[in-house]
Image (cartoon, rainbow, N blue to C red):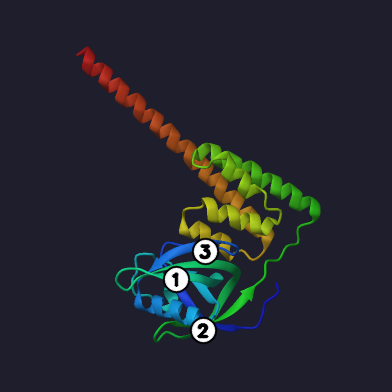
Amino acid sequence: MTNHDNTLMPLIPLRGLTVFPYMVISFDAGREKTVAAINEAVENNRLCLLVSQKDATKTEVESEDLFEIGTIARIKQVLRLPGESVRVFAEGLFRGRVEEIVSAEDYFEAEVVQLESQSDLTELETAAMSRKLAEVFEAYGRASGKISGETMLSMLVEEDIGKLCDTLAAGVLVNIADRQEILNCVDVRTRAEKLLGILRREIEIQKIEIRIQKQVKTNVEKAQKEYYLR
């Protein structure tokens, strides 16, 4: 794993949101410290670290409430909203790990190490893994019924398997813990295996949900029939 030197940057805590590298995102921010960190990044043209909170319901956060790995990002645009809030448009660039939070006065500022994805996959393994991911992702799409064929195709054109995993995780994973688990994987093989596991689990959950829905429908119909017969 290639680590760059530590860089000091404003840290922006996110509630109920995980940002991945290569992802363009917009989010609203209203907390004083968060807005101050955003202003610092924009005014001085600095990169910032977007980090998810472990508990999205917490309004006041300390360093231990934040995950260690987030995404180094560039803020593209900030729109002022009514009140003190802002809407931020940012682009994720690289994974970054918090080495130390050096200040939490006006806003969080942290020593951050940039993390480079690493892969020991051979060309054949990469091809096999890409195929497997596409297969499981398509099965997930069919089971959930939430993803159009066009969306699937647009997601699967990515050839870099590390980026493919990030794109799929960003596009389909809802659970913050699942998303963070993928973000934590600097090793590409581990990332792909973890993602396959999560998607397979989600497919099983979808199947069980469909079974329950059918059972409920049958029970309701049966009850109605008995009611009419009476």
Q: Is residue 137 visible?
A: no
Secondary structure beneath label 1: strand
In this rendering, does residue 178 appear at all?
yes
Residue, x 59% and y 55% (percent of image)? 167
Position of residue 90 measured from the top left corner of the image (x, y, whole percent): 51, 67
10 Å neighbourhood of mark 1: few (<14), some, or many (≥20)?
Answer: some
Q: Mark 2 vs mark 1: which is more N-terminal?
A: 2
Q: Residues within 10 Å of mark 3 (few under 14, many from 20)?
A: many
- Residue drawn at (56%, 67%) of the image: 92
Say which of 76 and 194 sits in front.
76
Q: For the residue marked with disc 1, what is the amino acid?
A: Val
- Assess whether mark 3 and mark 1 are in contact (beta carbons under 8 angstroms): no
- Work out whether residue 84 or residue 147 is closer to the camera in this orientation and state it: 84
Q: Quadrant of the C terminus?
A: top left
Label ID, residue 78: 1
Q: CA distance from mark 2 to mark 3?
A: 22 Å
Q: Residue furthest top?
A: 229
Q: Identify which residue is drawn at 33% across, 71% down.
A: 59
Q: Which mark is residue 44?
A: 2
Residue 26: x and y in percent read: 46, 63
| Label 1 or label 3, whichever comes before in sequence order | 3
Q: Is residue 65 left or right of residue 72?
A: left
Q: What's under tag 3, amino acid-wise?
A: Val
Q: Are marks 2 and 3 in contact (CB under 8 Å)?
A: no
Residue to which mark 3 is pinned: 19
- Relative to 71, say whether 229 is above or below: above
Picture coordinates of residue 60, whole percent (x, y): 34, 75
Vertical position of residue 41 compared to residue 206: above or below: below
Circle 2 crowding by C-alpha within 10 Å: few under 14, some 14–19, many from 20: few
Q: Quadrant of the N terminus?
A: bottom right
User: Considering only order in the chain, which callout, 3 or 2, is on the residue closer to the N terminus?
Assistant: 3
Callout 3: SS: loop
